[in-house]
Image (cartoon, rainbow, N blue to C red):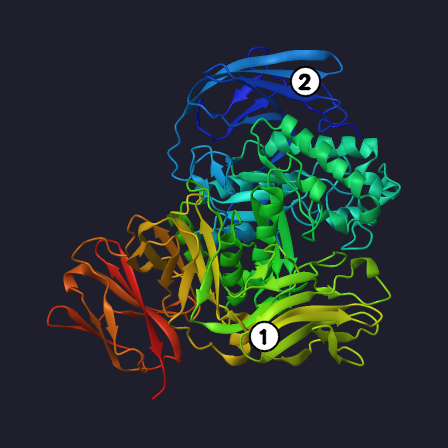
Amino acid sequence: MKQLVYIVLSLFCNVALFGQSVEKYGKFETDVASSIEYENPYNYDEVTVAATFTAPDGQQFNVDGFYIENFDLDTSNGGLSPSEVGFKVRFSPNQTGVWNYELAIIDSTGTNTVGTSSFECVESAAENNHGFVRKNDSNYLSFDDGDQYILVGENMAWQTGNTVNNYKSWIGRLSDFGGNFIRLWHAHWGLGIEWKNGWSGFKGLRNYQQIKSRYQDWLYDFCAEKGVYVMLCIQHHGQVSSQVNPNWNDSPYNVANGGPCQNTWDFFTDSLAIAHTKNRLRYIVARWGYSKNIMAWELFNEVEWTDNYSNHKEEIAEWHFEMSSYLKSIDPYGHIVTTSYAHDDEDPLVWSSSDMDITQTHFYNNVPNIERVLAGGVRRYLNDYQKPTLTGEFGLGGSSELANNDPDGIHLHNSLWGALMAGGMGTGMTWWWDSYIHPLDLYFHFDGVEKYSRRVAFLDRKLKPGKSAVSGAIGDLNLTPSSGWGTVASDSIVIDEFGQIIPEDATLGQYLYGSQWNTQYRSPPRFYVNYPDSGYFQVRTSSANGQSPHIAIWVDTVMVFVDSLASTNTIYEIGIPAGEHIIEVDNTGTDWITIAGYTFSDLGSKVDSYLLTAEENNYAAGWVLNNEYNHENVVDFGEPDPVSEASLIIPEFENGNYFVTWLDCLTGEVMYDELIEVGDSSLTVQIPELLWDAAFIIDTEQMVAVTDSEENTFSLYPNPTIPGTTINLAGLQSSQVNGIDLIDISGRHIYSFRNTTTYVDGSILSLRLPTDLNTGMYWIKVQYESGKVAAQPLVIGRE
C-alpha cells in the first residue's frame, strides 16, 4: 500500500525553518515539502532528501533528510498523539555565524532543488555543551572544546515500562550523582526501529517504527539537558541467532518473514541484507546524527553469539569493516564507531582496524574481586590495540540475583574504580540497571568516582597504567581467571616478590579443560613461586563442570594431589614448604570444570594498588583497595579489619618535591595531603588506614580540602568510640563551619549535627553521637563556609 506525502507549499515557501537562531552544536531542523507520492519514503533508493550546509568559513557538509510520521509527546506521562507527516532535515552547526544551506529531492525524476535559506549559529549558553565526543592521541576521549570526557555510568539498554517515565527516572537519578553515560540497545522490545511486519506496530524492512523513533527524539534531547552521552548499539546478537537469546524466528531478515536470508549467517554476506542494513544506518544518522550526546555508534552487541560464528568469523569481520567504513562516509559529524564481543579475545582483526575507534570488553564473573578481572581486560586491550578501551558490560553472573546478594553495591563500587584506574576511558558499566541499581538506589556510588575524575588530568597528562606495589600489609595472593570459553589462556606465570604476575598481560582460564574433550583449548597453569615461609596453595572451583573432571596438583614435578571426582564450589588445598617451587594444576579427567581462583598464602598484599602515570613520571593518579572488602567477605563475615601501616611503592618516579593528596572514594572529597620528596627515582608514601579504599593524586601542586590558611583540617577524638557518647573536633572555628554530617562507609547520609554541638575554648567542637549507631566505620564530614569540605574517619565499637 502506498504511503502518500501531500505537503504542498508554494514554490517560494517549501522549506519551513524552526527558529532563525541555533546554538553551536545544537539542533537545526527544517521541514522539506514534496507533492509527489512515494511507495516507501523510508527507502533511500526511491527518494533522498539531500541537504548541503555551508559554514561561515566556506566548509561544506552533506546531510541526508529523513521521512517522519510525527507525534506530539506529552513528557509528563509519555503520551503520544499523531502530528504532521513528511520529510525533515536536522543538522548541528559547529561554527558561529551565518550558515547557508540548499535542499534537494533526488528521486526517479532526477535531482530537484527545493529551497535555499540560511540561519545564524550563536554560542551556546548551556554549561554542559562541549560539542561532540572525539578520539585523540591518548587513551581517553575529549570533546570538541578540548575538555576531557571520562565516562561514568551504566547500561540502560531498554525500557521496562513507560519509556519517558523510565528514562526520566533512571537518567535523572544517575545524573544527580554525576553520571554522564548510558548504553542503549536498538532491540525490537526496546527502542529498535525495524522488525517483523505485524509485530507490535512494526512493518518490516525499510519501514521504520515511528513511535519508538519519536521516543528517541525526546531521549537524546533529554540526555543533552542532563549532560549524559549515549553509546547506541544498533544490532544485538539475538536478532541473528537461533540459539543464544534467539530472535531469528521473528527477524524481518529471515526468509520465512519475507526477508532475503535463508540462514542467520547470510545476514553478514547477502547483498540485499547488507543494502537493507545500510538503509537503516542512513536513516539513523539522518535522524539522530545531529545529537552531540550520541557518543558512539556500536555496530553489534556480542556478535560471536550469532549462529556458527567460528565458521563465519572472517565474513563477520568483513561485514564490520564494510559497515564501519560506510557509517563514517555518511556521518558528517564523525561519531565514534565500535562494536562488542562477549569474550575478551575476540576479534583481534576487527579491533585492530583503524575504523574501530575504541575497543570494548564484557565480563560476567561470579568472583569476590571482580574488579581484578575488569582491570586485567582493560590493560590487555590497551597493550594489544593501543586505543581507548571501555568495560562496556560487567556483572557477577547471568542474572541479577547474584548482584542483589550484594545490596550495598560493594562489587559495583569496586568495579567502577577498578576499570577506570586500570587505564580504561571510563568506569566499568554495570548491566543490571533496572533490577539492581535503581531498585536499591545505588546511584551514590557514581558520585565519588565522577568527582575524582574531574580532578585528575587523564587527558592532559596522557595517563597510562604504571607499576606500583604495597608493602607492610602481607596477605594472600588471589589470582582470578578471566579468559572465557574457547580461549587458550597463559600457561606459565611467574610471581615476583611484590605478588605481581609476569608477564603483566597473562590471563588464567575460567575453564580448566580435561584430557579428552576440547583439548585444543587446554592451557593448564604452571606457577613459579618463592615462598618466604611455609604456607599453602589453593585451587577454588566455581559453579559449573562438564563430565568427570579431576583436579590434580604437582609441586616441583611431583604429583601431590589428585581427586577421584572434582566438585564445584570447592577448595582444594596443599601445603607448600618455604623456598622456590613450581606449582602445576591440571584436569586429568574427561571434561572441563570452572575455576574461581588460585590462592598463594602470604605471597601478596591485603591491599591492591592501581596506578596511572604520565609519560614523564612526574604526575600520577591511583587507587588502593583493601581486597578483603569485597561483596562476598562483607556479606558473609562482616567488614574486615582495617589495614594500617601499609605503604605504596612506585618504583619509577621523577626526582623532586610532590604533594600526595588522598581522597575519599565515596564522596570524592579531599581527606588530606602531604609533601614528600623523591630523591632516588622511587616514591614511597604511607597509605591511610584502609577499611575499604582510597584514591590519590600525586602532583607538584597542592590540592587540599581547605585552601584558606585559617581553615585547617580538623582532628577527631576519642576515636574509636561508642554510640551516644561525645566526640571532639579540634581545630575548628564556629564562624568557619557551615554544617557537620555523619556519613556511613557506603556514602549514605546518616545524621546532621545541628543542635548537638558545643564549642569549647573557641576551637574545640563537641558533638553528641546518636545512640542507635551500629558498629563499623563512619565519616565525620565538615562543610566550611568557603564551600570546601574536610572529612575524618570515625570507628564505632561496642562497650
Rendering coords of residue 109 (x, y %): 74, 12
Q: Residues within 10 Å of mark 2 (few under 14, many from 20)?
A: few
C-alpha span from label 1 to label 2: 87 Å
Q: Nearer the viewer, residue 361 or 501?
A: 501
Say whether residue 234 is left or right of residue 586. Answer: left
Q: Residue at x 51, y 67 (%)?
A: 410
Rendering coords of residue 236 (x, y %): 71, 47
Q: Position of residue 559 (x, y in %)?
A: 75, 77
- In the rendered image, the quadrant that contains the C terminus is bottom left
* Label 1 crowd bin: few (<14), some (14–19), many (20+), radius 10 Å: few
- Taking 94 as reference, is 357 above or below it? below
Q: Nearer the viewer, residue 410 or 592?
A: 592
The residue beneath circle 2 is 35
Snapshot quadrant of residue 244: bottom right
Residue toward you, 428 or 272:
428
Question: SS class of the residue under badge 1?
Answer: strand
Seen at 57% across and 80% down, the residue is 534
Q: Nearer the viewer, mark 1 or mark 2?
A: 1
Which residue reaches farthest left?
761
Quarter location, residue 723: bottom left
Above-or-below relation of 607 to 237: below
Q: Is residue 424 left or right of residue 85?
A: left
Q: Are marks 1 and 2 in contact (CB under 8 Å)?
A: no
Please identify the quadrant where the N terminus is shown: top right
Relative to the observer, which residue lies in front, 282 or 661? 661
Q: Which residue is mark 1?
A: 579
Q: Quadrant of residue 650?
A: bottom left
